[in-house]
Image: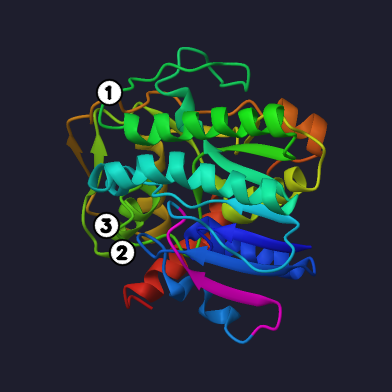
Amino acid sequence: MRVLVTGGAGFLGSHLCDRLLHEGHTVIAMDNLITGSTDNIAHLAGHDRFRFVRHDVTNYIYLQGPLDAILHFASPASPVDYLELPIQTLKVGSLGTHNALGLALAKGARILIASTSEIYGDPLVHPQQESYWGNVNPIGPRGVYDEAKRFAEAMTMAYHRAHAVDTRIVRIFNTYGPRMRINDGRVVPNFIKQALHSEPLTVYGEGNQTRSFCYVDDLVDGIYRLLVSNEVEPVNIGNPAELTILQFAQRINAIIGNEAGIIYKPLPKDDPQQRRPDITRARTILGWEPKVSLDAGLEPTVDYFAKKLGKR
């Protein structure tokens, strides 16, 4: 296939480019580099089946030649990013998704949209199934990301129903691994960075809120399986192994050997208290489930950050 990956220089987008090339496809990565980095795709420079295009997908997307598939992963994706870039986040979820869907329609291409567990908001149902509609504050500080993704799902299904576009929707739960930005603002890089600097880890609230962490290779495998499947309805991809943020902080300190401990700060507004995917659909439809344990995934992740910070 000839495949376009929007957000292709980002954390997830760059790993998807690797997987698609490994499967023998031709890949065009598109990114405006607002949160992505060409460092993530530098190893692909000169690859005969890879090309990078710098472009903002909130503007009209033009590509010459046939296109078989689009993976729309362009978006700020961490709270730090979408609180600093609220309008850009809303625009890429709305205008960017509209442009990507329009390109899919014009090219007769299959399109897979990256959605998120954040569409469930601060959930009243646990674990979260795809049938759950969510508990989202549309005007809260996190609403710009939540509602951008909810709109993107609605637009995707509208194109599927009105124009028979071949669509896929993946709802991504907390993912970690090499190529995350050091100043990403999410809990994994925050904790690892603080621990490597021998600083106390910052836990918000009492640390009782839960998360479920999926290693990037597992996530990419689930996404690829969804892309080549026939499933149109949204599918959760994530690791159902749940732990509290306090437990996670203690695990990071133990792995890195950080003796500085933990400090506590007030909980941010609308921070979800529970996050755990129900992956029954992924298991049933895609034959997928995560294989990499938390400790096994943290080893290369910590090593990546240590090298970035000059600690190794």
Within the magenta stretch, is there residue 54?
A: yes
Indicate the position of residue 79 as horizontal and vertical percent values: 32, 42
Indicate the position of residue 62 as horizontal and vertical percent values: 57, 62
Q: Residue at x 72, y 60 (%)?
A: 67
- Disc 3: CA contacts within 10 A as few (<14), some (14-19) or many (>=20): some
Q: Residue at x 37, y 23 (%)?
A: 273
Amino acid tagged 2: Leu
Q: Is residue 159 above or below residue 217?
A: above
Q: CB atoms at circles 3 and 2 under 8 Å apart?
A: yes
In the rendered structure, which disc, 1 or 2, sits on the residue that comes first in sequence?
A: 1
Amino acid tagged 3: Gln
Residue labelled with disc 2:
196
Instruction: Evaluate whether residue 176 shows in this view.
Output: yes
Q: Is residue 34 above or below residue 38?
A: above
Find residue 141 and report its image quarter.
Answer: top left
Q: Which mark identifies residue 194?
A: 3
* 176 lies left or right of 290: left
Q: Which portion, as a residue range, is magenta?
A: 47-57
Q: Which mark identifies residue 139?
A: 1
Within the magenta stretch, is there residue 73?
A: no
Secondary structure under tag 3 reads helix
Q: Residue at x 48, y 23 (%)?
A: 120
